[in-house]
Amino acid sequence: MLMAVFPLLSGKSLCMKYDLSNNNLIIKSRTMLRLQPVTPADKEALSYIEDLYVKSFPVDERRPFEKLVELLGNTPVFHLRLLCDGDKKVGFISYWQWPDLTYGEHFAVDPDERGGGYGGKALRLLCEELQTPVVLEVELPFDEMSRRRIGFYQRSGFTLSTLRYIQPPYFDGAQPLELHLMFYALPVPMESDAFSDFFCRVRDRLHRDVYGVEPGRYV
């Protein structure tokens, strides 16, 4: 018996079994990954996300979790999604969504679930849903892990920019970090003169709206 799985726009897959002995085609649907919106009232989801958030990101690369929850309740453009496979929690993603741009701030898959393809599936689902250019920050490719992370995003359709970018500190006492930006669905070619202007506009928006600093302070 042969089996094939085909994605559907509904967020499910179609599992097709073909019995060679009697030419019967057996079709059934199977639940796939979903991106569940999280609110400040979702205590169980927030507890899971906080634990994964703290384990996955160095202290200088994340805001205090209570500040994240405040943003979730007070900032309409800030969103938090729990990655679920059926009833199983497998990760989370936080992002800022404006009409013309989405910034993916933090994205993590549960260590116990890595290697299952959840990361790539989640990115594809989110990018298809948002229908805007997407930008995210990545560490410079200074070691094998950071190079693998960049490669993962490239395989998911993102393009790496090597223009200088500084991430402002998340809180007093933290250090600014030199990072790279990666883009999905760029509105202008990266090789064009227009990209430099686009890059600067994106940088300034992130600094002003996400980090709360005046554009031009960290360039």
Image: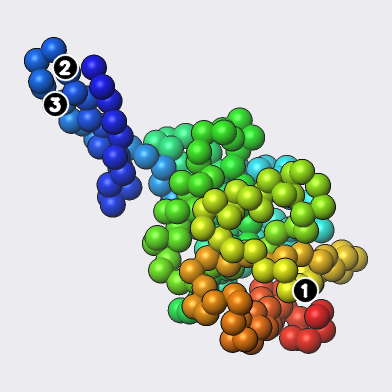
Contact check, label 2 and label 1, Cβ < 8 Å: no
Residue most toward the top?
Answer: 21
Q: Is residue 91 visible?
A: yes
Regarding mark 1 in the picture, which secondary structure is present there? strand
Residue at the (88%, 65%) spot, across then down: 175
* Amino acid type of the residue that numbered disc 2 sits on in the rendered structure: Leu
Q: In the figure, 78 relative to 40: above or below?
A: below
Quarter location, residue 160? bottom right
Could you classify mark 2 by the number of other residues whose Cα lies within 10 Å: few (under 14), some (14-19), or many (20 or more)? Answer: few
3 or 2: tag closer to the N-terminus: 2
Q: Which residue is mark 2?
A: 20
Separation of residues labelled 2 and 1 (CA atoms): 58 Å
* Amino acid type of the residue that numbered disc 3 sits on in the rendered structure: Leu
* Amino acid type of the residue that numbered disc 1 sits on in the rendered structure: Arg
Residue most toward the front?
Answer: 191
Quarter location, residue 140? bottom right
Separation of residues labelled 3 and 2 (CA atoms): 9 Å
1 or 3: tag closer to the N-terminus: 3
Q: Which residue is mark 3?
A: 25
Quadrant of image for the C terminus? bottom right
Contact check, label 3 and label 2, Cβ < 8 Å: no
Which mark lies nearer to you, 3 or 2?
Answer: 2
**Residue 156 position in % (x across, y down):** 52, 53
Residue at the (17%, 18%) spot, across then down: 19
Could you classify mark 1 by the number of other residues whose Cα lies within 10 Å: few (under 14), some (14-19), or many (20 or more)? Answer: few
Q: Is residue 82 visible?
A: no
**Residue 66 position in % (x across, y down):** 69, 58
Q: In the figure, 50 relative to 190: above or below?
A: above
**Residue 111 position in % (x across, y down):** 64, 35
Q: Which residue is mark 1?
A: 164
Could you classify mark 3 by the number of other residues whose Cα lies within 10 Å: few (under 14), some (14-19), or many (20 or more)? Answer: few
